[in-house]
Amino acid sequence: MANPNILDGKVILVTGAGRGIGRDIALLAAAQGAKVIVNDLGAGVDGEGGASAGPAQEVVAEIKQAGGQAAANTDSVTDPIAAERMLKQAVDTFGKIDGVVNNAGILRDRIFHRMSTLDWERVIGVHLMGSFYVSKAASSYFREQQSGAFVHFTSTSGLVGNVGQANYSAAKLGIVGLSKSIALDMQRYHVRSNCVSPFAWSRMIGTIPTETEDQKARVEKLKNMTTAKIAPMVVYLLSDEAKGVNGQVFAVRMNEIFLMSQPRPLRSVQRSEGWTPQTIAEHAIPAMEKHFFPLEVSADVFSWDPV
């Protein structure tokens, strides 16, 4: 029987926890017994605008009002020194760190040929670089105590594909590689690293265009997928109940949980005398092309309504 408070005694850092999915993770983690560092820069969905302590402080107040323990942090995940401060705050305030949720993110959607260098760098900086900086800062504590859990946020934009999100897709698929490397490198220290790909209506998803009837219908369906539905899987992965789960990628959509595939060989061909460009065209590609993946977006793969 699982512990009724699955995170009793644990200290958890959640980045981007002032709103949306991060907020619900922080609230549920606290309700499940964790002491929580609520990190949020307080900027806009595109990363612009002045930093504000408001969102993080509001979540901390909610947790305390419910009888939990939490502290606010407004450092940016894009700064490696600030990432170290987050972890130091957790240890100074609550005595240790047991889990890290890399949730912070921004969007700067553009069709590829119109995407600026700045759009690329900012999104990669928050999602991929930020996940690395925070994880790296936590790794020394985890290694010393011989325990710890990472949960990183990926997306079907990277796992499957999406239009107008080259920066976001690249970052989110990169996070899968980062998570797997952490899992492999740190398993000897009993440290786990997994990814969650969420389907949920949030401030970030709210930027999806609604110009056509199909787009409007899609957005209405998305609005039913609340951010609170994502939190239970994340909290589980942070707990000792998940001690045998490492290096995996899960997707969560309403009441559905998916274990996502990871790249493995599908088909192989060989030619004893070696290959030329001509024999590749004549032999290799015809043998493989029926296994090619179509150019799909997330909505093509997850084509049924959420349940």
Image: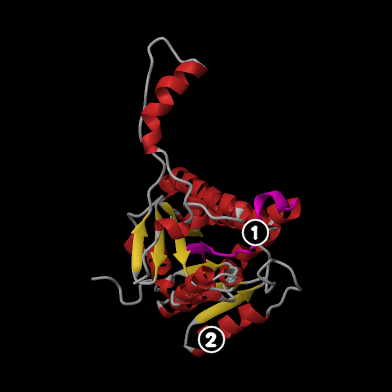
- Could you say where residue 146 lies in the image, as x and y percent from the top left? 44, 53
Q: Closest to the observer: 189 or 149?
A: 149
| Label of residue 158 in the image | none
Residue type at numbered disc 2? Glu
> Disc 2 to disc 1, how far (Cα)?
26 Å
Give the SS element for disc 1.
helix
Q: Is residue 16 left or right of residue 7?
A: right
| Residue drawn at the location 59% of the way across and 65% of the way down | 104
Q: Is residue 214 left or right of residue 254?
A: right
- Please state the total of marks drawn on the protein image: 2
Residue 104 lies in the magenta-colored region: yes
Which corner quadrant holds the C terminus?
bottom left
Mark closest to the chain's N terminus, 2 or 1: 2
How far across and down, in percent of the image, does residue 121 sit?
70, 52
Residue 265 visible in image: no
User: Can the viewer see residue 286?
Assistant: yes
Q: Residue furthest top?
A: 273
Q: Nearer the viewer, residue 54 or 290?
A: 290
Left or right: residue 227 versus residue 6 is: right
Q: Which residue is mark 2?
A: 62
Q: Is 295 placed above or below 52 here? A: above
Q: Which residues are magenta?
A: 95-116
Depth order, front residue of 253/82: 253
Q: Main secondary structure of the magenta part?
A: loop
* Location of residue 196 by image quarter: bottom left
Crowding near pointer 1: few (<14 within 10 Å), some, many (20+)? many
Residue identifier under label 1: 126
Instruction: List x then y, in percent, for residue 288.
Output: 39, 31
Does 236 sit left or right of 64 as displayed? left
- What colour scheme was applied to this rendering of the protein? secondary structure
10 Å neighbourhood of mark 2: few (<14), some, or many (≥20)?
A: some
